Image (tube, rainbow, N blue to C red):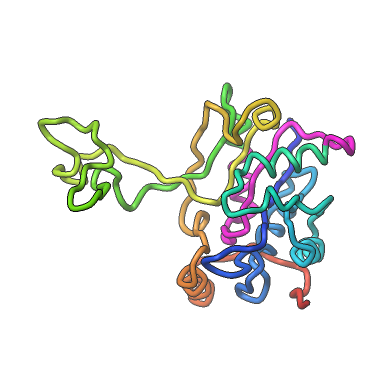
Amino acid sequence: MPSIVALIPARSGSKRVVDKNVRPLAGHPTIAYTIAAACRSGVFGAVIVSTDSERYASIARHYGAEVPELRPADMAGALSPDIDWVRHAIGLLDASGRSFECFAILRPTSPFRLPETIRRAWSEFQAEAGVDSLRAVEKGSQHPGKMWVIRGRRMTPLMPLSPAEQPWHSTQMAALPEVHVQNASLEIAWSRVARDGGTIAGDVVMPFLTTDAEGYDVNTEYDFWYGEQLVARGEARLPEVSEAPFFG
């Protein structure tokens, strides 16, 4: 069985929701649920948080993750590509003699991802030959064939390659090809993809289909409010966190 490390990105400086990666959700900072899911999955040889914040690092360590070194500021901007911090984290591990054959990216904004979600994804990835990576997706609620790009007072279809005799924008939804949209639940890839290539995904990507709240993402005030409602109504469950809530 190949070795794998969990990489949890948690930069500070988010704009839409300030400190969204550590904002309280059902009694714990959001990141606590991702750390708990990773640790309880039994899949990973290490659970590493990549952050540019000392405060975030303290929270991550409280909940059982490692923070070997703070992420450099030039890799922690709103436009910083994932490949930079992934290579940085893998490089730190390599330099310390702790190389892993694979890595998983588990984003804190997907708190409803469960340990069994991770185990299922890891099992599917190992069973699939010839792929560079796996990415979580869910069935799209909206179809790109119905989307438009507006320029001034004119608009053109986002998907211009639909049949001229029956454009997708004028086709019943049931007749359109099924599409899936990626979510933030998880990604898994061979470490060689990041070390040797310029992306975190490579060229051959397999799907991992999430269900229910596994891919629910908290990126806005409404997302956090609705996430609390899901928990309160028992419509979704968060990973069990054994540590006391972090205050500080």
Question: Looking at the image, can residue 147 be seen?
Answer: no
The spot of residue 72 in percent (x, y) is: 75, 50
- 66 above or below 19? above
At horizontal 21% and vertical 33% (from top left) the residue drawn is 162
Q: Which residue is painted at 51% across and 66% down in the image? A: 16
- The outermost residue toward the front is 152
In the rendering, at what x and y percent does residue 211 appear? 47, 52
State which quadrant residue 119 falls in: top right
- Is 36 located above or below residue 126 in the figure? below
112 lies left or right of 182: right
166 shown above or below 77: above
Q: State the extent of the magenta-drawn residues as a range.
A: 94-122
Question: Who's the residue at 70% across and 32% down the image?
Answer: 191
Residue at the outermost right position = 96
Q: Is residue 103 magenta?
A: yes
Which one is in front, 78 or 106?
78
- Quadrant of the rendered structure where residue 238 is? bottom right
Q: Is residue 56 magenta?
A: no
Classify the position of the C terminus by image quarter. Answer: bottom right
